[in-house]
Image: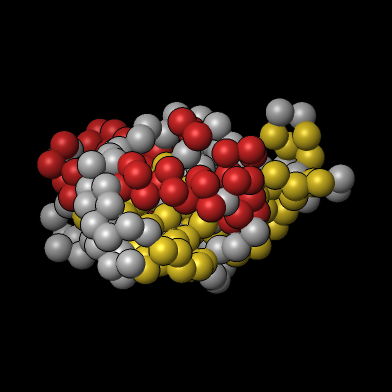
């Protein structure tokens, strides 16, 4: 199934793209989806401590247990620095 | 209720933003004017660039305001965060909190900026004469 994937700031620089589409196994769990993203974008793990990255599914912070559906919007980003 | 939360590509007028939160039953508005610092840890910044995950940032700002209303005796909250390129001294964020009494307004304003820096998906790039870096927040927690 196809999902939308977004990167911002430092992760966009690492991934070389801000917005793309990727293929994932149907109804995969979020934590597996993000592992798949790391495999597809090796510079992410190279440039960032995985544990320091944040994930969201459909614009909500993800814990990892969410089920991903076709067309969902996923994002991977570093700790926020607004203000 | 006249809360508001916005992202803007234009110069922020803090007085105008602060006035928008004031209802007649209030006696105090506390406004934070956060602006671009020239020196961070001794290094000189030339300018900043802010980027946001806009729809998620707006959702998180809305949640922040709802949580602040539960925690503090406040009337209205306005938050406007600037995006794009900002020069030294330009306002990057305005948070205005109106309350019947000043103490709750001060406390809520401090709580709001602290939480915003932890949860709202906005990132800052510091550009120096000899390079640039996307700043990573230090205190953000996963899943919040």
Q: Which of A14/B81 is in front?
A: A14
- Give x and y (percent) for residue A33: 37, 49
| A12 vs B73, nearest the viewer | A12
- Quadrant (top left/top right/bottom left/bottom right) for the N terminus of chain A: bottom left
Can the viewer see residue A38 in this picture?
yes
Please tell me which residue is depicted at 27% across the width and 60% down the height of the picture: A26
* Residue ranking furthest to the right: B130
Q: In which quarter of the image is residue B91?
A: bottom right
Work out whether B93 lies above or below B113. below
Q: Is residue B58 visible?
A: no
- Front residue of B125/B105: it is B125
B85 vs B131: above or below: below
Residue occupying image coordinates x 14% and y 63%: B1
Q: Which one is in front, B24 or A75? A: A75
- Residue at 37% x, 66% y is A3
Q: Which residue is drawn at 66% across and 43% down?
A: B37
Q: Is residue B129 left or right of residue B136?
A: right
Where residue B48 appears, as percent x and y from the top left, is 67, 53
Residue A2 place in picture, x, y as percent: 37, 68
Task: Count every numbered label the image shows and give the total.
Answer: 0
Residue A10, position as x, y percentages in the image: 61, 48
Q: Is residue A46 rendered to the left or right of residue A32?
A: right
């Amino acid at each position: 199934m196809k999902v939308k994937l977004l990167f911002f700031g430092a992760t966009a620089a690492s991934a070389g793209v801000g917005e793309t589409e990727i293929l994932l196994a149907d109804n995969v769990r979020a934590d597996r989806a993000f592992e798949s993203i790391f495999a597809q974008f090796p510079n992410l793990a190279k440039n960032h401590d995985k544990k320091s990255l944040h994930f969201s599914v459909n614009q909500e912070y993800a814990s990892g247990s969410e089920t991903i559906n076709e067309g969902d919007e996923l994002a991977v980003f570093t700790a926020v620095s607004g203000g | 209720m006249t809360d508001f939360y916005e992202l803007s590509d234009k110069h922020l007028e803090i007085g105008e933003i602060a006035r928008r939160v004031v209802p007649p039953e209030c006696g105090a508005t506390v406004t934070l004017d956060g602006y671009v610092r020239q020196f961070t840890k001794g290094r000189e910044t030339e300018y900043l660039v802010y980027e946001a995950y806009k729809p998620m940032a707006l959702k998180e700002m809305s949640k922040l305001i709802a949580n602040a209303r539960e925690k503090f005796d406040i009337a209205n909250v306005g938050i406007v965060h600037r995006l794009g390129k900002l020069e030294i001294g330009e306002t990057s964020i305005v948070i205005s909190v109106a309350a019947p009494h000043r103490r709750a307004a001060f406390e809520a304003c401090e709580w709001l900026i602290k939480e915003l820096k932890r949860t709202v998906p906005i990132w800052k790039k510091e550009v120096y004469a000899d390079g640039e870096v996307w700043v990573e927040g230090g205190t953000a927690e996963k899943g919040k």
